[in-house]
């Protein structure tokens, strides 16, 4: 898990508000970009001003933070121009917030693009197929404008093989392609990238969904050029298609800069050993599976594996471990002490199997694990990993009444042992307020707190009370909290607390919670830094939606599904706020012609581009 | 608290399988609306019968009141009210009696509801099925088709989306085989899907959505009498004429569909002999 991944979701900076406020306070009918634009009929600046602008450009080259750049661009026209000339990374948090041509007109020397598309609830099947977020219009604009583009990072976009081909053809200096939770492309597109991007350093495919046409799978690994490559990172564990292993081994052998390699589940331990022998310099390794190939005929692969790990002195991050055969785990002991990141979230391990490994991982900062290890396993983590910053506990069986063996007890252990914890994602069946309160007190550095009690509306396991008190403690005591996901039985009180104390919260995720409109109102009025609000199955109606009108321009988006919204309320929002795009999404239904009053899914977002033109039939823009 | 649960469970009727009740067009809206009703068990029955007759979306005003009432569960449904403050109802946080009954309500609601809610728990699809695949030596199963498809429920058994391509049309589609009851319904759905595209293909001036007069339906897909014929590919990759096997077997074995020109079909390329295949999940 690269640190960048978790950063991707915590990317919002309050500077976004500064960027938007001056623009939208005026009723502009001309389509100008965010920030003040150059007036018509301005005479060219005199010579000395030109010199100053050149100097300014040289200075601004060093300014990298998005927030600082946005602020600088608002100083005056000269600074606006200079900033636009010197910006190298373009970040667009919502691909529909601005039109591609507008971005390209303002910023002319971009080298790196980060673009995000669908709302996060698309990951959980709440956004129907074909909703949008096509990369195509963007890649065409970029292809025409940015000859020096080196890096593209996309999250939740729909990317086709044709788009990948355009990338390969348009950017001769292209170095870095990172696709996170994207879909629509196949191994064919990957082959084009491999073949034609001669300077490729990073090809990271993270949690994408490839179109796997079984009869049309291309062995893209073989398409990398036969010469020495400049590859530094190759991540493809989400590519489920098989590939030619020998080609991969040769590729690794001729990639001396390779630091990060994460293979898919078609790699068994015997093959892993060979890869590791070719690349002892690896820092990040994804093992694919962690099982032996039956009948391989090799003499005790375990021995070689131990020496393979022993030789990998630079390994700091391990992941993969699918279909794990725990008897091979001791092979990784030589690297445990150096590990800062360990991902066991696909390994069905018991506490006994985890224990000897985790006891050696003193320097671990990031740990992802399945709840199969139980509270006992988490106790071992708490005792061994004192430096832990990020913990994610996933459910082995993600249903509401599974036998999860992690609970409030495990959370309590973690809170007592891992005092430096900054980010936690915890799936469990039952929880207590006491454990959450304990965490709030023991881990004051928490920035991200995501608790998912899988049974809906479940109260405190012991006292029977709602989970209001626990979340109250979190928002009160964790003063740096910027991201919060709530669950369990929650009344409006919980939201009152969140609104009152959660002043830094930028991302809030709500499901099956609250009693009435008041709950949402508290949040909208109280959380002044709120950027992303996603709500499902909660009893918030039109009145609460309308109460948020003064704030929606300051947010990136609002998602509400299965709440109590109606067309009347949503139309009023759309009427009142012309720079908001208000999308009503129905599930893909063919027959119904007349308008249904109840709104099943609402997605609204601020935008300079107005209503998008690629709307599918099941989306209505008000 | 735990001891109360069985008694309440007995009150809930066992035949709450309205999801599978022959209404093959499973709409998430309906599912979710019905799923979230959290009134007292006795009220569930009446509501179900009423709602199956109505469109799902008209539920939102009158029926969602029950969502809130469970919290103050001594209060029964009090008619329509779009804005009801929880403070009006008996306080939830402090009365143990109300809490207990509402907890028991909840546990019975969540424990006995058969239909999983879409997208809950919020786990991405590639993290599912870990319990089964991690115990076997076989490679990880391919994920559920289309993780971004909102119509597909969490369970594998609901919603079986397969790709369908038509000869001469570059854009494929996806359809849910379980949405149809028999071959005729499937055939007419395929007709609907591609009719517009086909017309647009033939005459680029025709808008995909318009041109009712010019559009002729795509007929004869199943019997070889029309210009096009429907075939499917099973998990072994063989192409088989659609219609040979019983419908239920078909939807569990078909991996993708193709609409081919009848003139292109040759006897050797199509396996017309229906074979018994193990039923697998789509």
Image (spheres, coloured by chain):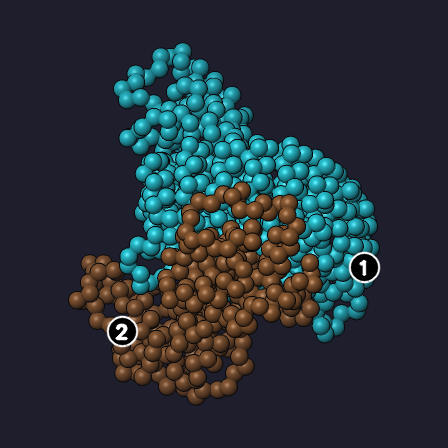
Chain colours: A cyan, B brown
Q: Residue B166 in the image: x percent, y percent?
A: 34, 70
- Mark 1 lies on a secondary structure that is helix
Relative depth, front residue between A248 and A433: A433
The chain identifier of the residue carrying mark 1 reads A
Q: Tell me the residue that label 1 is attached to.
A: A352
Relative to A99, residue B217 above or below: below
The chain identifier of the residue carrying mark 2 reads B
For label 1, count other residues whose C-alpha is less than 10 Å away and answer few (under 14), some (14-19) or many (20+).
few
Residue farthest to the bottom, as pictured: B273
Residue for point 40% across, 76% down: B181
C-alpha separation, residue under disc 1 versus residue under disc 2: 62 Å
Residue for point 37% across, 43% down: A569
Left or right side of A294 for A489:
left
Q: What is the number of the mark on residue B218?
A: 2
Left or right side of A400 for A93:
left
Relative depth, front residue between A92 and A417: A417
Relative to B22, residue A136 above or below: above
Relative to B184, residue A482 above or below: above
Left or right side of B172 for A275:
right
Q: Residue A144 in the image: x percent, y percent?
A: 37, 41
Q: Residue A549 in the image: x percent, y percent?
A: 41, 35
Residue for point 78% across, 43% down: A417
The answer to whether residue B191 of the structure is visible from this angle is yes
Q: Residue B234 in the image: x percent, y percent?
A: 47, 77
Residue for point 57% across, 32% down: A500
Residue farthest to the left, as pictured: B213
* Number of numbered markers: 2
């Amino acid at each position: 898990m690269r640190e960048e991944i978790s950063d991707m979701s915590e990317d919002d900076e309050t500077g976004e508000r500064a960027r938007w406020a001056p623009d939208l306070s005026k009723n502009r009918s001309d389509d100008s970009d965010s920030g003040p634009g150059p007036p018509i009929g301005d005479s060219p600046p005199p010579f000395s001003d030109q010199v100053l602008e050149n100097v300014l450009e040289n200075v601004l080259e060093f300014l990298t933070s998005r927030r600082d750049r946005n602020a600088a661009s608002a100083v005056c026209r000269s600074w606006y121009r200079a900033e636009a000339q010197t910006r190298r990374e373009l970040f667009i948090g919502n691909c529909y917030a601005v039109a591609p041509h507008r971005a390209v007109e303002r910023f002319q020397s971009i080298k790196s693009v980060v673009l995000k598309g669908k709302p996060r609830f698309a990951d959980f099947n709440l956004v129907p197929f074909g909703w949008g977020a096509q990369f195509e219009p963007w890649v065409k604009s970029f292809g025409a404008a940015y000859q020096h583009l080196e890096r593209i990072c996309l999250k939740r976009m729909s990317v086709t093989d044709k788009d990948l081909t355009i990338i390969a053809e348009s950017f001769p200096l292209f170095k870095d392609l990172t696709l996170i939770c994207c879909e629509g492309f196949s191994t064919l597109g990957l082959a084009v990238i491999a073949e034609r991007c001669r300077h490729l350093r990073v090809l990271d495919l993270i949690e994408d969904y490839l179109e796997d046409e079984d009869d049309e799978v291309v062995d893209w690994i073989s398409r990398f050029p036969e010469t020495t490559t400049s590859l530094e990172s190759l991540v493809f564990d989400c590519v489920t298609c098989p590939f030619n292993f020998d080609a991969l081994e040769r590729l690794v052998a001729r990639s001396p800069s390779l630091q990060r390699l994460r293979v898919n589940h078609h790699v068994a331990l015997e093959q892993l050993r060979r890869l590791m022998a070719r690349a002892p310099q690896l820092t990040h390794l994804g093992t694919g599976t962690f099982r032996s190939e039956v009948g391989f005929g090799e003499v005790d692969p375990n021995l070689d594996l131990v020496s393979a790990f022993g030789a990998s002195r630079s390994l700091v991050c391990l992941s993969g471990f699918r279909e794990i055969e725990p008897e091979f785990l001791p092979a990784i002991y030589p690297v445990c002490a150096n590990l800062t990141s360990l991902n066991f979230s696909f390994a069905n391990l018991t506490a006994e199997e985890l224990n000897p490994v985790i006891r050696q991982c003193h320097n671990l900062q990031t740990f992802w694990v399945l709840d199969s290890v139980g509270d006992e396993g988490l106790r071992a983590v708490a005792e061994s990993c004192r430096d832990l910053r990020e913990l994610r506990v996933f459910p082995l069986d993600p249903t509401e009444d599974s036998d999860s063996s992690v609970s409030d007890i495990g959370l309590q252990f973690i809170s007592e042992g891992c005092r430096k914890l900054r980010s936690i994602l915890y799936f469990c069946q039952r929880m207590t307020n006491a454990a959450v309160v304990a965490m709030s007190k023991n881990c004051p550095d928490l920035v991200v707190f995501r608790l998912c009690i899988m049974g809906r509306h479940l109260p405190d396991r012991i006292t029977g009370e709602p989970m209001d008190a626990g979340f109250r403690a979190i928002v009160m005591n964790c003063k740096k909290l910027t991201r919060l996901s709530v669950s369990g039985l929650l009344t409006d009180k919980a939201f009152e607390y969140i609104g009152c104390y959660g002043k830094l919260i930028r991302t809030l995720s709500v499901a099956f919670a609250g009693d009435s409109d008041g709950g949402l109102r508290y949040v909208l009025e109280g959380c002044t830094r709120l950027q992303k609000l996603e709500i499902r199955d909660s009893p918030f109606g039109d009145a609460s939606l309308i109460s948020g009108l003064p704030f929606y321009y300051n947010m990136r988006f609002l998602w509400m599904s299965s709440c109590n919204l109606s067309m009347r309320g949503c139309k009023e929002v759309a009427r009142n706020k012309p720079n908001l795009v208000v999308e009503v999404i129905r599930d893909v239904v063919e027959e119904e012609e007349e308008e249904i009053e109840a709104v099943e899914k609402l997605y609204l977002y601020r935008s300079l581009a107005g209503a998008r033109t690629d709307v599918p039939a099941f989306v209505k823009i008000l | 608290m735990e001891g109360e649960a069985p008694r309440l469970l007995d009150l809930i009727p066992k035949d709450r399988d309205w999801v599978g009740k022959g209404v093959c067009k499973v709409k998430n809206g309906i599912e979710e609306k019905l799923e979230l009703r959290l009134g007292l068990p006795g009220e569930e029955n009446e509501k179900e019968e009423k709602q199956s007759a109505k469109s799902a979306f008209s539920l939102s005003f009158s029926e969602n009141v029950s969502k809130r009432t469970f919290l103050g569960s001594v209060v029964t449904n009090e008619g329509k009210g779009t804005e009801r403050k929880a403070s009006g109802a008996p306080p939830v946080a402090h009365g143990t009696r109300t809490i207990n009954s509402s907890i028991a309500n909840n546990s019975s609601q969540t424990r006995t509801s058969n239909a999983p809610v879409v997208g809950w728990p919020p786990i991405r699809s590639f993290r599912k099925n870990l319990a089964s695949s991690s115990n076997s030596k076989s490679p990880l199963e391919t994920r559920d088709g289309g993780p971004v498809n909102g119509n597909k429920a969490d369970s594998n058994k609901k919603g079986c989306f397969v790709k369908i391509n038509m000869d001469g049309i570059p854009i494929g589609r996806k359809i849910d085989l379980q949405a149809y009851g028999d071959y005729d319904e499937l055939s007419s759905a395929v007709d609907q899907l591609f009719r517009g595209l086909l017309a647009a293909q033939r005459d680029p001036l025709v808008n995909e959505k318009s041109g009712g007069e010019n559009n002729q339906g795509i007929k004869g897909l199943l019997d070889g009498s029309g210009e096009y014929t429907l075939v499917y590919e099973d998990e072994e990759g063989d192409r088989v004429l659609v219609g040979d096997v019983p419908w239920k077997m078909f939807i569990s074995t078909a991996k993708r569909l193709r609409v081919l020109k009848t003139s292109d079909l040759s006897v050797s390329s199509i396996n017309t002999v229906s074979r018994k295949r193990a039923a697998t999940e789509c």
